[in-house]
Structure formats: structure tokens, C-alpha cells
Image (tube, helix red, strand yellow):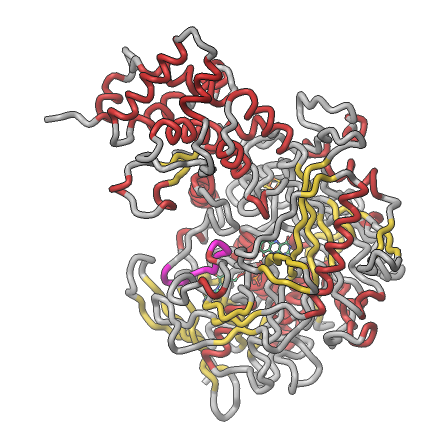
């Protein structure tokens, strides 16, 4: 019998779940959202929301390791992965932590299980993918093509940019092979670009006409230009008076979503949950990962709050509910409900087992959790692709101290502003993709924070060297103000053996499965690292950078390739565990993100992406989520 | 009942300051390279002194401060004397938090520098806590915010005292950079 209380059950309150919830409730549908995190954190307004933020901030200030998850509770009953657990696979104890890492490399990216999900600690970079990213197979004979093209996704990108509130400059986006229709005519982002950092301007000036050799061989020259581009990002700046949209709505007649047009100049940045006048502009807190104190940076609770405000009677949110199984009807193959455990408090295993039903089910629990849930339910896996093709941007970091022509310290004053405001875009696409992975290079505004835990470690090292007094102060000043860091974020290609599985032996506190992860880098990515390092060496040499890059063999993801050692690091971009395709035999969902196997089950999140491109995935994933929401509405109304 | 050292401090706080506190301040200035006024300006002096005094080996801490007092009052080159007494590690030792039982004075001096710069304190109360991780902590949220490291890096603590929209596109206040032209907007 069909349940009539809810049209849709959504598992997860991250950006994917939030966008589905808002789009559906705006169209009058009744939605139940289940979230595994603490009830107290699901605070959308006023004093309560403020107190939650104070608590997160205080925890962050007091954390000795300021990792992405450091401000937020890691629950026994709904554990989060944490990069701090990452170590060489052979040294990891499978009884500890959350991921069970089977290697050979450790998967080095985490997410946060809790209200608002991982957007709580994301950086907020919101680049679109490039047209060629959708057809790697056709263009370069690599990976797979998507079942949809960039052109299909373009209107949904605009919806995502509205919802996240993107600040950026269209005319700066001179990207490789994009053609004139990359942005629709007259399009502008909702807000003006976030000012580029002082550091960016210095580096940009020195390198804007530079070319580098990308052959990987000093004897052979294949020159490739370096092009810089301001980075669009989901943090508030000055509204763009030419922006002409005020929302996304469902056209019930045409059966599609559309952007609501309004008189230009009306865009209002979305401020903090507790006070709309706080966070109207990015204030330069330089802590976006892991927490924006003023909430100038987008997080998914902003979307949930809007949905809840507009349709309080249509959106029911149940916290402390951990979904663990989808029940499949053996005859119809339809999903009959979601089983979840509702726990009393994080201190006890006390929980009740409950069952949620609706006409349509949406998993929005993030790539790894979605895969885990499907595997635990034996659902959606006729293709045997669930959990496979796990991807991330594998990052090669290179760092040093900037010097002028006379080898004197050249201060760039890092540790200020948002994490990154400029990127090198010219390696995002090109014929080289036949040989090795493409990459993007964000210029990092936070010194050596990522690889070396600066500035704290610099003090310990200097003191360890016996420095003190005025000399210590001077030394730290010249070191810290000259630190530069580049990331070469390489696109990982889909590999079926990079996968999430489950195993009876590994369960968490509530008896739910922990993800068991097999992970490695292909030669396609390793070759990209080799060339990227070759390029970095040229850039550093030309810019008088005193290179301090150091890859040590006892680091988690250290490996050797063609005689050189490298350390790769995860970017937090967890992608590809239930990919979309045009053939049910080799994909999990169709282009509407409906599972091939169960007509009333949709998957959202980065797991749907067949490949990852060189952009941080969340904007693309959000665009896809609008597309999925549209398909859900269509199905509900058919 | 015997009073704990911490109680003694709390009680003596207020009307009369602990006689070792000025020594602690003067030594902190010599160790950090910041003036006493700058250090007092952080508002952290009492909390840091208290942090030090909470260590169980109270006698050891007093002896350390006594020695520091002697050096600071002495006629000799104070810098060289501090270096010899507190900073020079035996060959091969680079641990910024050397074990207390091995080198009590060096261990304390280094911890005091780290405390002022980063708000981090590694306690020497071995018996109460198990692992190195548990012994090391940031003593308070304020200690993080007031870390001298931010001043030295010519910035603000990440996540606090934000300098305002667009500030990062210009050199920071007081930057002695001849190339300021790039930063003008
Ligand atoms: C350090 C870092 C920086 C990043 N920076 C960027 C960036 O700059 N740009 C970018 O594009 N991306 C970035 N990302 C990636 C981005 O954060 C994620 O892609 C995005 O937040 C994923 O959203 P989601 O809604 O799919 O999943 P999540 O945000 O992970 O949300 C999952 C939700 O599901 C809930 N949940 C999970 N399991 C269950 C269960 N069993 N039952 C009930 N509820 C459950 C959780 O509580 C949570 O609410 C970054 C990631 C990290 C780690
Ligand atoms: S720079 Fe600061 S204010 Fe701006 S988004 Fe990051 S944390 Fe928030």
C-alpha cells in the first residue's frame, strides 16, 4: 500500500539533500529528511544557531590540529571519517578510525556526518567543468564519456550558482576550449568576484606571459602557456547589479525547473543563520576550512533554512536518525522504505529502529555513505558498479619561500583572506590529456598550512633549533611572510578496483557497516604528477622560489614513479561511487539520477559523476542535483 | 589541609601578585623577543603564569624561575646566559618539548616560548595523562587568538579578529614592502 504522508524521503542534510528538499517543498511536495547528526546542530535560526556556531568555534580555537573536521563533533553512533586518521596503510589498525583502508594507498579525504554536511568545512570553490570534461573518451581516448554534455548542464549550473551564491567574474574565465557559449548571453554571477589576494597579484604579474615545457624531458620542448583566472566561489561579496534572477521554480505545465527573473539589482547575499546582516561580505577570517565564523561562506543549512521558512508544514526533519537499509520489494523492485536507527544521545547505544516510507526515495548521504547504504541493502547494483570508480583530486603540493632577484626575501603576506582566490587554468584541458591527467593549480593564500601545518610548526622547528628572543621573532617573520604553496590537483581517472565495499567484520558502534576502501593511483595520474613536478620546478626557478618541497617516505601517500618519490594528498573531493551512464550494464543511475534498478530510488551527490574534471565537484554536483529534483517532480506528477 | 599550588596562586592573586610573576614576565620577554609591554598587551600574562604554576613539580618550577631571576638580575650578558642555561640543547636534540625529567630547564624555557607564540602547552604532569597527544593542548580559546605567531606573520589569527572585506588584496598594515604598488587598489 502506498504511504500518503510523504512524497519523498531524503537521507542526508548536506547540499545535495538540501537542494532536493528545497526544490520539492517549493513545488508543494511533502518531504521527510533523515539526518544522522545531532539534533542540537540542526539549528536554523536565532540564538540556537548562534550558540551552535560559538560551540564549533570554541572547539576549533582549542584544537591542536586544525583539520577540516576539528570544530565539529565526531559521533560514535554516526562516525565521520577524519583525515587525521590517514597513515600509511600498513601502519593503520583496522579497529580504529572510520574507514577501513585496504590500500595500497590510503584514501586521504574526509567528509562530515552532521547537519549541513561537508559544506560546513568546504572551501567553497565553485568552478564549472569544461565541455571536454564530459567527453574524455571521444576526445582523448581516456576514461568514459558522460551520458550528458556541458550544454545539457548549463541551465542547471545557473541554478546551482544562484543557490550557493557565487561571487565571480565571467570575463576572467578564459578557459581552454570552452567556446563562446560557455556562459549564456549576458550572464553574470550573483556577486562580483572576491578580490584576488596580494600574493596572487604579485605572482600573476610575474608570470602572466610565461610558458613552460610540459614534455617532462629537458631535451625536448613542448611549450604550454600559464594562464591565471580569478576563482568563482561560494562566499559573499558585493552583489552584481546586472544579475537578474531571484530563484528557481517548478513550471508545473511545462514540467521543468526555470530561473525566476526579476528586475536586476535585487540580489541579496544570504547571511549567517542567526542574523541575516552578519556575513553579508567575506570578512577575511582566513579559516573557511574548517569554519567561517561569520558564515559569509555558503553552507547547506542556509538552503534548509529557506525551505523550512517557506514551507514549514511540508518539510519534516528528523535528526539522530541513521539510515542503514533500503527495503526492496522482491517483485516490483520498488523501494518500500528506509530502515533507520534513531539514537537517544551519542553517549549510549540506545536507539529505536524505525521505518520511513514515501513514494520516492533520495539518497544524499555523500559518495561513500550512499555506496555503503546500497551495498548493505543489496540495492541498485545489477551493474556491479556500486562502490567502484572512487575518485578524488590527487594533489601534488609544492612549496617554498619567495625571493627577489637578489635572493632577498620577497614578502607576499600569506595567511590572509579566503583559501584561494586565483587559479592557473591552462592545464585543465589540452591534447596532453591523451598522455596524462589534467590538473588545476589554485594559488594558496595560507602559506604552508596544508603540507607543513604552518604557522604553528614553524615555531616548534625554530625553537627546536635553539632560536629565541629577537632572533626568533625576526626569523619567523621573514619565513612566514614569504611562504608560497601551489597545489597541482590532478584529475583521477575511474578505476573499477578503487572501491568502497562492506565486510561483516567491520561495523561501528551502532552495528552499521564501516566503509572498506581499496585505493590506488593509476599511471595516468602518476605521469601527471611527474609532469606537474617538472612544471613546478620551472615556475619556482623562474620566480626565485627557495624550494622547500619535501616528500618523505613515511608520509601516508608516498610513492615512487620513474625513479622519483612523491606524496599525494586528498582534496576532499569524494566522487564516482555510483556513476551515471547511458547503459544499465555499466552504470548505476540514468541521466536523471534515477537508479536503473529501482524506479523510485534516486541518488544525489558526487557519486553520480562518471569523471571528475579539474574543478572542485560540488557546483557540478549541485547542478546535477537540480536536474535530479526536476526528474523527481516530473515523476511525482506523472 | 595542605593547599595545592594552584590554590595558593588563586588566593594570592588580586591584591598581591605572586613575587615570581615579574620574573616570569621578564624572562618571557627575553625568550620571545617581544617587550614586556607587548606581552602584557595580549592580556594573557596571568593565565600563562597560572598554566606554568599548575605543573605538579612546583618546586622545580620555582627553582627554574629563581635561576631565571638570577640571570636576569646578573651583570653578565643576559642573552648569552639565557642561551647557555635554557636554550642550547645537547647535541642532537631537536625536540621542541624535551622530556622534563631529562632537561627540566630547557624543557620549561621552550614550552614558555611555544605558549606565548601559539597558546600550546605540553604538561609535564606525566602521571595524569597518557599519551603525548593528551599532554599537549591549547590552553584556552583566547590563548589561540592572542598567539604572538599571528603578529609575527603580520596577520590575524585564522578564524578571529577578521580584518575586513578585501583586506587581503593589499599588504597588511605596517608592511615594509618596497613593492606596494602591486597591492594598491
Ligand atoms: C576540506 C574540504 C574542502 C572542500 N572544498 C571544496 C570546494 O572548495 N569546492 C567544492 O566543490 N567542494 C569542496 N569539497 C567537497 C564538498 O564538501 C562535498 O562535495 C560536498 O559537501 C558534498 O555534499 P553532499 O551533500 O553530497 O554530502 P555531505 O555534505 O557529506 O552530506 C552528507 C549528509 O548525509 C548525512 N548522512 C550520512 N550518512 C547518513 C545515514 N546513514 N543516515 C542519515 N544521514 C546520513 C550526513 O549527516 C550529512 O548531512 C571539500 C571537501 C573537503 C573535505
Ligand atoms: S575568508 Fe573568512 S569570512 Fe571569508 S569565507 Fe573564509 S572564513 Fe569566511
The relative height of residue A287 versus residue B63 in the rendered view (above or below) is below
Name the foreground residue: A475 vs A207.
A475
Q: Residue A5 in the image: x percent, y percent?
A: 46, 73
The relative height of residue A114 versus residue A295 in the rendered view (above or below) is below
Name the foreground residue: A636 vs A103.
A103
Give the prevailing secondary structure in the magenta stretch.
loop
Left/right of residue A420 with respect to residue A603 in the rendered view: right
* Magenta stretch holds residue A78: yes
- Residue B3 in view here: yes
Left/right of residue A433 with respect to residue A15 in the rendered view: right
Task: Find the residue positioned furthest to the front.
Answer: B91
Q: Quadrant of the C terminus of chain A?
A: bottom right
**Residues in magenta?**
A76-84
User: Residue at (66%, 73%) from the top-left corner?
Assistant: A494
Q: Residue B93 in the image: x percent, y percent?
A: 45, 37
User: Residue at (39%, 39%) from the top-left corner?
Assistant: B137
Q: Residue B99 in the image: x percent, y percent?
A: 35, 37
Q: Which of the 4 quarters of the picture holds residue A432?
A: bottom right
Amino acid at each position: 500500500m502506498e504511504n500518503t504522508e510523504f512524497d519523498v524521503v531524503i537521507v542526508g542534510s548536506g547540499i545535495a539533500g538540501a537542494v532536493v528538499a528545497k526544490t520539492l517543498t517549493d513545488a508543494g511536495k511533502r518531504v521527510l529528511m533523515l539526518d544522522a547528526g545531532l539534533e542540537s546542530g540542526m539549528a536554523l535560526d536565532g540564538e540556537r544557531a548562534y550558540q551552535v556556531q560559538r560551540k564549533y568555534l570554541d572547539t576549533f580555537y582549542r584544537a591542536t590540529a586544525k583539520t577540516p573536521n576539528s570544530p565539529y563533533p565526531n559521533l560514535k553512533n554516526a562516525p565521520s571519517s577524519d583525515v587525521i586518521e590517514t597513515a600509511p596503510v600498513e601502519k593503520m589498525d583496522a579497529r580504529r578510525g572510520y574507514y577501513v583502508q585496504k590500500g595500497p594507498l590510503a584514501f586521504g579525504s574526509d567528509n562530515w556526518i552532521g547537519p549541513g554536511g561537508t559544506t560546513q568545512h568546504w572551501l567553497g570553490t565553485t568552478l564549472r567543468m569544461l565541455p571536454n570534461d564530459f567527453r574524455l573518451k571521444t576526445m582523448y581516448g581516456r576514461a568514459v564519456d558522460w551520458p550528458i554534455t556541458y550544454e545539457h548542464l548549463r541551465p542547471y549550473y545557473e541554478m546551482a550558482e544562484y543557490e550557493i551564491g557565487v561571487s565571480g567574474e565571467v570575463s576572467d574565465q578564459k578557459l581552454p576550449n570552452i567556446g563562446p557559449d560557455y556562459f549564456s548571453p549576458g550572464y553574470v554571477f550573483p556577486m562580483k568576484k572576491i578580490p584576488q589576494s596580494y600574493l596572487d597579484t604579485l605572482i600573476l604579474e610575474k608570470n602572466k606571459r610565461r610558458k613552460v615545457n610540459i614534455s617532462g624531458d629537458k631535451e625536448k620542448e613542448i611549450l604550454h602557456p600559464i594562464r591565471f583566472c580569478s576563482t568563482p566561489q561560494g562566499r559573499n561579496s558585493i552583489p552584481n547589479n546586472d544579475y537578474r534572477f531571484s530563484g528557481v521554480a517548478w513550471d508545473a505545465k511545462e514540467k521543468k525547473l526555470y530561473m525566476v527573473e526579476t528586475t536586476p539589482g535585487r540580489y541579496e547575499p544570504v547571511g549567517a543563520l542567526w542574523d541575516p546582516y552578519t556575513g553579508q561580505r567575506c570578512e577575511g577570517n582566513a579559516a573557511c576550512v574548517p569554519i567561517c565564523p561569520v558564515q559569509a561562506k555558503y553552507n547547506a543549512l542556509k538552503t534548509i533554512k529557506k525551505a523550512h521558512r517557506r514551507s514549514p508544514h511540508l518539510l519534516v526533519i528528523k535528526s539522530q536518525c541513521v539510515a542503514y537499509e533500503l527495503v526492496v520489494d522482491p517483485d516490483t523492485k520498488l523501494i518500500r522504505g528506509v530502515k533507520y536507527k534513531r539514537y537517544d544521545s551519542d553517549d549510549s547505544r540506545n536507539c529505536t529502529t524505525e521505518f520511513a516510507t514515501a513514494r520516492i526515495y533520495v539518497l544524499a548521504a555523500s559518495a561513500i555513505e550512499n555506496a555503503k547504504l546500497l551495498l548493505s541493502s543489496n540495492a541498485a547494483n545489477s551493474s556491479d558498479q556500486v562502490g567502484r570508480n572512487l575518485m578524488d583530486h590527487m594533489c601534488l603540493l609544492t612549496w617554498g619561500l619567495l625571493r627577489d632577484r637578489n635572493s632577498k626575501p620577497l614578502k607576499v603576506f600569506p595567511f590572509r583572506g579566503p583559501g584561494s582566490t586565483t587559479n592557473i587554468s591552462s592545464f585543465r584541458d589540452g591534447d596532453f590529456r591523451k598522455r596524462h591527467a589534467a590538473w588545476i593549480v589554485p594559488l594558496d593564500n595560507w602559506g604552508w598550512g596544508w603540507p607543513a601545518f604552518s604557522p604553528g610548526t614553524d615555531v616548534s622547528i625554530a625553537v627546536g633549533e635553539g632560536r629565541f628572543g629577537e632572533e626568533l621573532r625576526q626569523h619567523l617573520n621573514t619565513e612566514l611572510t614569504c611562504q608560497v604553496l601551489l597545489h597541482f590537483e590532478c584529475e583521477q581517472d575511474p578505476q573499477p578496483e578503487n572501491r568502497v565495499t562492506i565486510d561483516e567484520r567491520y561495523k561501528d558502534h551502532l552495528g552499521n557497516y564501516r566503509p572498506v576502501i581499496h585505493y590506488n593511483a593509476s599511471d595516468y595520474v602518476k605521469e601527471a604528477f611527474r609532469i606537474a613536478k617538472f612544471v613546478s620546478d620551472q615556475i619556482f626557478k623562474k620566480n626565485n622560489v627557495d624550494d622547500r618541497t619535501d616528500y618523505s617516505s613515511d608520509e601516508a601517500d608516498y610513492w615512487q614513479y620513474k625513479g622519483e618519490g612523491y606524496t599525494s594528498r586528498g582534496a576532499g573531493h569524494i566522487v564516482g561511487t555510483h556513476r551515471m551512464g547511458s547503459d544499465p550494464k555499466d552504470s548505476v543511475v540514468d541521466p536523471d539520477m534515477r537508479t536503473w534498478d529501482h524506479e523510485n530510488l534516486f541518488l544525489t551527490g558526487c557519486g553520480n559523476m562518471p569523471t571528475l574534471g579539474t574543478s572542485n565537484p560540488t557546483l557540478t554536483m549541485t547542478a546535477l542535483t537540480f536536474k535530479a529534483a526536476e526528474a523527481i517532480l516530473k515523476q511525482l506528477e506523472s | 589541609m595542605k593547599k595545592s599550588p594552584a590554590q595558593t596562586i588563586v588566593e594570592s592573586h588580586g591584591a598581591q601578585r605572586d613575587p615570581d610573576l615579574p620574573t616570569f614576565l621578564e624572562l618571557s620577554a627575553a625568550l620571545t623577543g617581544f617587550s614586556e609591554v607587548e606581552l602584557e598587551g595580549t592580556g594573557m600574562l596571568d593565565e600563562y603564569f597560572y598554566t606554568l604554576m599548575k605543573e605538579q613539580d612546583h618546586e622545580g618550577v620555582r627553582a627554574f624561575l629563581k635561576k631565571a631571576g638570577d640571570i636576569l638580575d646578573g651583570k653578565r650578558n643576559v642573552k648569552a646566559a639565557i642561551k647557555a642555561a635554557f636554550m642550547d640543547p645537547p647535541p642532537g636534540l631537536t625536540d621542541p618539548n624535551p622530556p622534563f625529567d631529562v632537561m627540566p630547564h630547557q624543557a620549561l624555557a621552550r614550552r614558555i616560548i611555544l605558549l606565548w607564540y601559539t597558546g600550546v602547552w605540553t604538561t609535564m604532569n606525566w602521571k595524569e595523562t597518557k599519551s603525548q597527544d593528551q599532554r599537549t593542548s591549547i590552553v584556552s580559546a583566547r590563548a589561540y587568538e592572542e598567539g604572538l605567531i599571528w603578529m609575527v606573520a603580520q596577520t590575524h589569527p585564522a578564524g578571529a579578529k577578521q580584518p575586513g572585506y578585501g583586506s587581503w588584496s593589499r599588504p597588511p598594515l605596517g608592511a615594509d614592502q618596497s613593492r606596494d604598488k602591486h597591492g594598491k587598489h
